[in-house]
Each structure stands twice: as C-alpha cells, then as structure tokens.
Amino acid sequence: MDAFLDLLACPACEGALHADLSCCGCGARYEAPAGIPHLRLANDARVDLVRRFYEHAPFPGYPANDSVAWLRARAERSEFARHFANFIMNAQAVRRDGAAALDLAYVAAGRFDGFWEEGLKPWDVAAGSLLVEEAGGRVSKYDGTPLSIYTPPILASNGLLQEEMMRVLSI
C-alpha cells in the first residue's frame, strides 16, 4: 500500500498522504470504501456534475437502476469477458480499439496478430474479413467453421495463430 500511496496526493493542497489517508499538509482525511480512496474535493462542482450523471445512468447504454455490483456480476457471466480474460493470460498484449473494420484491417496489414468478436453486424466484418483473407490470413468462427458475415462470432488471424486462438476461445 505504501508504493500506492506514493502515487496519490491530497486534492485540496497536493500534500502527501499518510497510511490512514490523512493529508500531511492540510490534515484532510479521506475514506477508502472497498479499498479505493475517495480523493474528491467536497464542493467541487465538476465532480458533483459527473457524480449526478452517473447516479442516473451509471454506464451509458445500461438502465439507471443497474447497480455496479449487478453490472460486475453480469460481466463475470459474459462470454466476452471470459474470452478477454483468457487472452490476457495467454497473449503478450490485448488491444480493443472499438472498430471491428479497423481491427481487421490491422490484422491484414500485420499490425495485429488476431481479432475476435461476438455480435457484430455484416457491415462491421464484410470488408475487413476480405482484407484479412486477401493478405493471407484466416477468418472463421470460433470453432474453425467458415465465417458467415450474417452470423457472428468472428475469429481472424495472420494465419499462423488461428489454431492457438481457437484453443484460447475454447477454454
């Protein structure tokens, strides 16, 4: 915890923090529910605005009454979260840019070694999957069966890692 505290500073005076999360400079005390320090200024209008926004809609696209605990439990049951965790444990790095077409183009160009995703639409994968195949890579479903752009999921690789990526997705 000491190394972690060295990275933190009091938001009121930028002073160092003691182990009990009190400021060495101004003496302000901060709480740490669930081990995460609340280093917020009490009457900061910007912080209050953001806090009010997330109280009504904690995560864009999710109903406002969803609790963080419920969302965390949902993520733990998610196939995507399981696959993501497995790739983190079995790969050197994982990047998720959020644009399937760009990610597939990066696989085709050799910038990325592979790509996997569930729930995409045909327009997300049609051009990118063709680019990967034309560049000598492989595109399939997670189990190795041929890809249909109309029925996800998609697995694409440089061709050398397809079998290994299929193995990770089957864990």
Image (tube, rainbow, N blue to C red):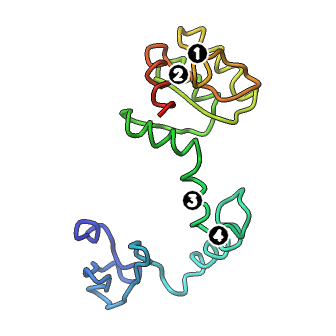
Q: Which residue is mark 2?
A: 107
- Report helix, strand or loop for mark 3: helix
Q: Is residue 144 above or below residue 8?
A: above
Q: Of marks 1 and 3, which one's residue comes earlier in the chain?
A: 3
Q: Of marks 4 and 1, which one's residue comes earlier in the chain?
A: 4
**Amino acid at the residue labelled 1:** Val
**Amino acid at the residue labelled 2:** Val
**Amino acid at the residue labelled 3:** Ala
**Is residue 118 left or right of 3 when viewed as pictured?**
right
Residue toward you, 2 or 155: 155
Mark 1 and mark 3 in contact? Answer it, CB < 8 Å: no
Query: Label 1 to label 2, Cα distance in Å?
Result: 6 Å
Q: Is residue 113 above or below residue 4?
A: above
Give residue 73's mark: 3
Residue at 44 percent across and 36 percent down: it is 87
Mark 4 and mark 3 in contact? Answer it, CB < 8 Å: no
- Report helix, strand or loop for mark 4: helix
Q: Which residue is mark 1?
A: 132
Dot 2 crowding, Cα within 10 Å, few <14, some 14–19, many 20+: many
**Amino acid at the residue labelled 4:** Tyr
- Report helix, strand or loop for mark 1: helix
Q: Is residue 168 above or below residue 82?
A: above
Mark 1 and mark 2 in contact? Answer it, CB < 8 Å: yes
Residue 83: percent from left, percent from top: 51, 38
Residue toward you, 36 or 101: 36
Query: Label 4 to label 1, Cα distance in Å?
Result: 40 Å
- Report helix, strand or loop for mark 2: helix
Give residue 54's mark: 4
Dot 1 crowding, Cα within 10 Å, few <14, some 14–19, many 20+: many
Q: Total number of numbered labels?
A: 4
